[in-house]
Image (cartoon, rainbow, N blue to C red):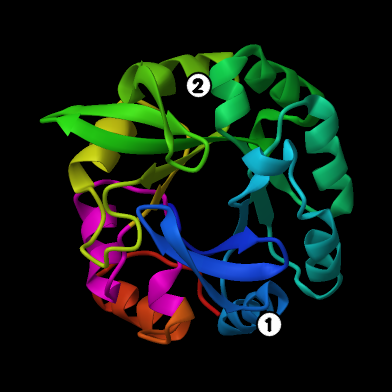
Amino acid sequence: MRNIRLIPRLDIKGTNLIKGVHLEGLRVIGLPGDYAQRYYQQGADELIYMDCVASLYGRNNLSHIIENAAKDIFIPITVGGGIRSVEDANHLLRSGADKVAVNTAAVANPSLITEIAHRFGSQCMVLSIEAKQMSPDYWEVYTDNGRERTGLDVIDWVKQGVTLGAGEILLTSVDREGTRKGFDISLVRAITQIVTIPVIASGGMGKPEDMIDVVQHGDADAVAMADILHYDRSTLAEIRNIAKLAGIDVRHL
C-alpha cells in the first residue's frame, strides 16, 4: 500500500510567498523561507515551489530561494514556473531542487518532456497541468498560470505527456484553486484511471476531510495544499492524524 504524500505548495512572486484564487488576485503571505521551514518542521513529505510570474521574466527566478531552502530542508523539492529548456531544469536542480514541474513550455514544445526525462530521469520530470472545466467530463489545459487557453483536452495531454516520459503529474484545478471548496474529484479520478505514474491533486483544499475525499474517491497519490496551511486553518500534524483515522496510509513521523 502506497503512502499518501502531504505536500505544501508555495507560490512565489518575486521574493514573497503569495496566494490567490483561481491563480489570480495574488495576496502576499510572507517570506517563503519562513513558511517552508515551518512546514518542514511539521513533517511535510515534500515541498512544491511555483514561480507565479515566471512568464513575465521568461525564466524561473527561484534559484536563490531554492539554494537557501536546500541548506536546511531535507525532503524532496519540486520547482516549477518558467522552465523552458534542459538548461533551465539543470540550473534549478543544481540549485537544490529534486524535480522540475513544466507546463507552458511543454505545451509549446512537447519534446522538452522527453529531453528532461532522458537527461535527468523521468522521476525528475513533473508534468504540471492547469485544468479548467469547460463542460461535463471535459477539461481544457491552460498555461501561463491559468491565463492562456490551449485547446488541449487534459486527458489527451496527460496520455501524451506520459508517453513522452513524464514521471509524475501535478494536476491543478484552476476552478477550485484558492476557493476552499474541495478538490475536483471528477478531474482527479479521470486522470488517475488512465495513468500508472503518481498524480498530485492540487487546488481547493479547504479542510482536512477534502484530502480524504480526493484520496478515497479520486485515487490521488499525493495532495498539494496551500491556503489551509498558510492561513493556519489546520496543520500538517492535524491533517496527518485525520488521514490515519480514515485509514489512509501516510508517513509515520
Residue 22: percent from the left, percent from the top?
A: 35, 53
Q: Which residue shows up at 53% across the image and 20% down it?
A: 107
Q: Left or right: 68 with respect to 198?
A: right
User: Magenta segment range?
Assistant: 204-229
Query: SS class of the residue under badge 1?
Result: helix
Q: How far apart are marks 1 and 2 (CA)?
A: 35 Å
Seen in the picture, residue 87 relative to 231 is either above or below; the reply is above
Q: What residue type is labelled 1?
A: Asp
Q: Which residue shows up at 74% across the image and 18% down it?
A: 115
Residue 137: percent from the left, percent from the top?
A: 15, 28
Does residue 100 appear anywhere in the picture? no
Q: Which amino acid does label 2 sit on?
A: Val
Task: Give the total number of marks visible in the rendering.
Answer: 2
Q: Which residue shows up at 65% across the image and 51% down it?
A: 78
Magenta run includes residue 220: yes
Q: Which residue shows up at 27% across the image and 48% down it?
A: 175
Does residue 94 appear anywhere in the picture? yes
Task: Answer with the quarter of the image where residue 180 lies.
Answer: bottom left
Pointer 2: residues within 10 angstroms few (<14), some, or many (20+)? many
Front tag of 1 and 2: 1
Residue 80: percent from the left, percent from the top?
A: 64, 45
Pointer 1: residues within 10 angstroms few (<14), some, or many (20+)? few
What residue does disc 1 label? Answer: 34
Query: Which of the marked residues, 1 or 2, is nearer the chain's N terminus?
Result: 1
What residue does disc 2 label? Answer: 162
Extreme-left residue of the structure: 136
